[in-house]
Image (cartoon, rainbow, N blue to C red):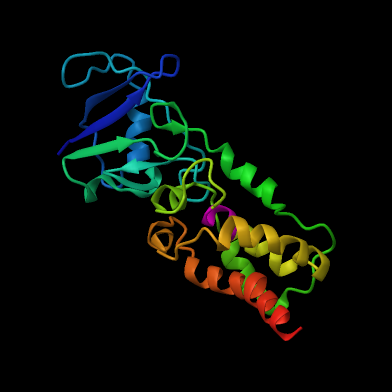
């Protein structure tokens, strides 16, 4: 049994886009999309279904074990990790496209540097020694599992490039820092949290269903809002 990859390609220099269909007939039981892409790139004389040469497909990968998030792309329209999608579970034709909410570098590779810019803008680091987090271990562990893959932003109806809303890609690591921050730092983080996360989130929670790491976004968002917004509101109300 073979598969056909319908790949949306973008030239790195001209940014011209075109589609290319590539047959893959070396299917093995546990092959993933990532496995196939690596093997396709190992064939220098490969031709597509129309007889045109297949240049090396540009994409990112690192661990290939669903731990780094580097191979995020759209597979049959769904943002996910290429190393997590088994070919045996897909139809004969598999559509591969780059994430749409990030600048395309080439082919399936996008520039996700904005994710790290958000962390810098939000000040996601501890300024002093961490507070005792024994009572928050589950919360801290859950928020530490973010891969910074960008899938949550790709699926979010409220996120768009250039807007104030940073999405869950910043909220999740921000939650971990909040749990260990002292009172002074937490107070300084509240204004940014409210403007960049709380006010932009429409609570659709599409991110919860798409997260490759299976992070419970609803739980983290609820706890973070309680810590960074509602306690502030309650304090103001009582003053």
Please indicate whether residue 114 sits to the left or right of residue 42 in the image: right
- In the rendered view of the protein, which quadrant contains the N terminus? top left
Which residue is more in the foreground, 156 or 192? 192
For image coordinates 68% across by 52% down, the residue present is 122
Percent x, y of residue 107: 38, 27
| The magenta segment | 167-171
Return the x and y of residue 193 as percentages of the image width and height.
64, 60
Assign the C terminus to one quadrant of the image: bottom right
Kindly identify the residue that appears in the image at 47 percent across and 32 percent down.
103
Q: Is residue 211 visible?
A: yes
Q: Is residue 38 above or below residue 140?
A: above
Q: Which of 25 and 184 is in front in this view?
A: 184
Residue 77, image x, y percentages: 29, 44
Q: Residue at x 74, y 54 (%)?
A: 125
Decide if residue 177 is in sight here.
no
Magenta residue check for 168: yes
Determine the image quadrant of residue 231. bottom right
Q: Answer above or below: position of 55 versus 107.
A: above
Image quarter for residue 115?
Answer: top right
18 relative to 134, above or below: above
Viewer-closest of 83 and 17: 17
- Name the quadrant containing residue 142: bottom right
Q: For this rendering, which residue is in front, 116 or 198?
A: 198
The vertical placement of 166 against 31, above or below, is below
Judged by its main secondary structure, the magenta piece is helix
Residue 128, given in percent of the width and then of the height, sits at 85, 60
Q: Is residue 12 left or right of residue 48?
A: right
The number of discs equals 0
Q: In the displayed structure, does residue 44 sit left or right of residue 158?
A: left
Tell me if residue 90 is in the magenta stretch: no
């Amino acid at each position: 049994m073979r598969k056909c990859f319908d790949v949306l390609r973008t030239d790195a220099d001209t940014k011209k886009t075109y589609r290319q269909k590539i047959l893959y007939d070396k299917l093995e039981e546990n092959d993933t999309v990532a496995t196939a892409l690596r093997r396709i790139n190992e064939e220098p004389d490969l031709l597509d279904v129309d007889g045109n040469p297949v240049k090396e497909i540009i994409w990112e990968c690192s661990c290939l074990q669903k731990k780094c998030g580097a191979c995020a792309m759209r597979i049959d329209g769904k943002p996910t990790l290429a190393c997590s999608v088994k070919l045996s579970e897909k139809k004969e034709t598999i559509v591969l496209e780059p994430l749409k909410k990030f600048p395309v570098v080439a082919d399936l590779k996008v520039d996700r540097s904005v994710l790290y810019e958000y962390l810098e803008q939000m000040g996601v680091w501890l300024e002093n020694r961490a507070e005792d987090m024994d009572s928050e271990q589950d919360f801290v562990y859950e928020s530490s599992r973010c891969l910074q893959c960008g899938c949550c932003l790709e699926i979010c109806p409220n996120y768009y490039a250039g807007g104030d809303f940073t999405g869950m890609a910043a909220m999740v690591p921000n939650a971990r820092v909040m749990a260990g921050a002292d009172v002074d730092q937490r107070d300084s983080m509240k204004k940014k949290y409210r403007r960049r996360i709380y006010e932009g989130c429409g609570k659709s929670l599409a991110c919860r269903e798409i997260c490759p790491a299976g992070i419970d976004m609803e739980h983290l968002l609820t706890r973070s809002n309680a810590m960074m917004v509602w306690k502030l509101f309650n304090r103001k109300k009582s003053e």
